[in-house]
Image (cartoon, rainbow, N blue to C red):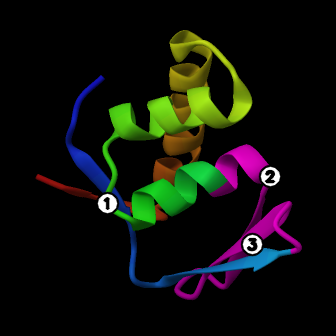
Amino acid sequence: MTDSLQRPHDHVVYTEFDGREAVLVDLNAKRYYTLNETAMLIWRGLERGRTKDEIVRELMDVYDVTAEHATASIERLLSSLAAHRLLRTDA
C-alpha cells in the first residue's frame, strides 16, 4: 500500500446524518453519493490527511477486523471515489 495521500476535492461536500450515514455531493457534476459507517470513517480519515495505513489501523480498532479486510475495504472505496473523480492525489 502506498503512502501517497489522497484528499477530497474541494468541490465535494460531505454531510453526515445520524452518525450512521453520510452523503457526498459533487458540486461540479451535481451528483450525490451515500456512504455507510465504514465509508464515513474512511472519508473522515482522508479529510484529516491520514495515510491509508493509519486508516487501516483505525478500521481494525473500531470494527475488530483483520488488516487484510480493512485494506480491501479501503482500496474498494478509494477506487470508487477516484473513478467518480471525488479525490485528488497529493504527492
Q: Quadrant of the N terminus?
A: top left
Is the residue marked by circle 2 packed among few (<14), some (14-19), or many (20+) residues within 10 Å? few
Examine the rendered structure and indicate whether residue 1 appears above or below residue 85: above
Magenta span contains residue 37: yes
Q: Which of 8 and 21 is in front in this view?
A: 21
Q: Residue at x 47, y 30 (%)?
A: 57
Q: Which labelled disc corresponds to residue 40?
A: none
Q: Name the residue under label 1.
A: 49
The kind of residue on which mark 2 rests is: Asn
Q: Which of marks 3 and 1 is nearer the N terminus?
A: 3
Please, what secondary structure does the residue beneath circle 2 have? loop
Q: Give the range drawn in magenta.
A: 18-40
Please, what secondary structure does the residue beneath circle 3 have? strand
Q: Mark 2 points at which residue?
A: 36
Image-based side of 27 in relation to 56, left or right: right
Q: Earlier in the sequence, mark 3 or mark 2?
A: 3
The kind of residue on which mark 3 rests is: Val
Q: Distance between the residues labelled 3 and 1?
A: 19 Å
Examine the rendered structure and indicate whether residue 6 appears above or below residue 63: below
Q: Name the residue under label 3.
A: 23
Q: Position of residue 24 (x, y in %)?
A: 66, 72
Please, what secondary structure does the residue beneath circle 1 have? loop
Q: Where is residue 9 in the image (x, y as percent from the top left)?
A: 39, 73
Q: Position of residue 23 (x, y in %)?
A: 75, 72
Q: Distance between the residues labelled 3 and 2?
A: 9 Å
